[in-house]
Image: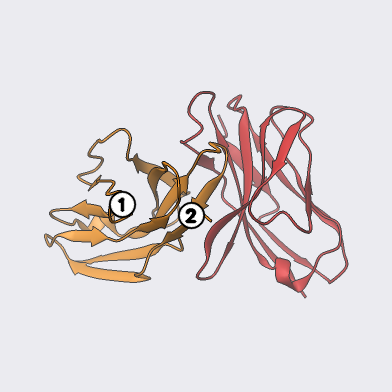
Amino acid sequence: AQRVTQPEKLLSVFKGAPVELKCNYSYSGSPELFWYVQYSRQRLQLLLRHISRESIKGFTADLNKGETSFHLKKPFAQEEDSAMYYCALRGDNFNKFYFGSGTKLNVKP
Amino acid sequence: NAGVTQTPKFQVLKTGQSMTLQCAQDMNHEYMSWYRQDPGMGLRLIHYSVGAGITDQGEVPNGYNVSRSTTEDFPLRLLSAAPSQTSVYFCASSPPGQSYEQYFGPGTRLTVT
């Protein structure tokens, strides 16, 4: 069965510190992984997908199939990065998405 | 464009009552979906639609019905509300060929007493 696990409910870091939000998944096939973000008083929105291999707002994420992980990283956190981050997966059925429980990132000044 | 709109924003129901959560989008998106969000559980897919007249079940479809008579609208019906359906409900849509990029609505907070 498909499953996405985000082990940290809350992650607090100081501005300028590196950030890593963890995401592990369970899926027997070839998944497609995403990170979605919800800033305060805004809607949930796509941040990045593993296929594009882009850096968005300084964030990157690499799919590690051996460790079944898709951790989100940023070398220097900014206060505006404070938000709720959700890892998501879709499998062979491109129409079905599975979300993790989310991690709240708090970047302190 | 208004994007994805949901009504109502808040709703309180009594057990056994029925209601329809409305979702509409004005972006001509083919794919639309409904999620529920419960504390500590993230978003779970209830139903989805890949176009007018086509719907399918997601991860947690029991207790919910959907229909898709137009491209714009994708209502979610609770026929007999139960306290277990207390949740925040999100509707989302995706553009053709980019189903990975979901545009979410603002959510409906539903309480069933």
Which image quarter holds the N terminus of chain B?
Answer: top right
Q: Residue at x 50, y 54 (%)?
A: A2
Q: Chain under label 1?
A: A
Q: Position of residue B50 (x, y in %)?
A: 65, 31
Indicate the position of residue A34 as horizontal and vertical percent values.
39, 45
Identify residue type, mark 1.
Answer: Phe
Reading the image, the residue beneath label 2 is A99
Q: Residue at x 11, y 59 (%)?
A: A16
Q: With respect to residue B85, does B6 lie above or below?
A: above
What chain is tagged by disc 2?
A
Mark 1 element type:
loop
Q: Which residue is mark 1?
A: A70
Q: Secondary structure at mark 2?
A: strand
| Residue nearest the viewer, comparing B101 with A2 | A2
Image position of B43 (left or right of A46): right
Say which residue appears at 47% left-offset and 36% top-offset.
B100
Closest to the camera, between mark 1 and mark 2, is 1
Name chain A's colour: orange
Q: Quadrant of residue B15?
A: bottom right
Taking B85 as reference, is A87 left or right? Answer: left
How packed mark 2 is, by other alpha carbons closer than 10 Å (few <14, some 14-19, many 20 or more), is: many
Chain (red):
B
Q: Quadrant of the C terminus of chain B?
A: bottom right
In this view, the residue in front, A66 or A101, is: A66
- The image position of residue B17, as x and y in percent, is 87, 64
Residue under disc 1 on the same chain as residue under disc 2: yes
The residue closer to the viewer here, A64 or B2, is: A64
Amino acid marked by disc 2 = Phe
- Left or right of B26? Residue A105 is left
Q: Nearer the viewer, residue A88 or B69?
A: A88
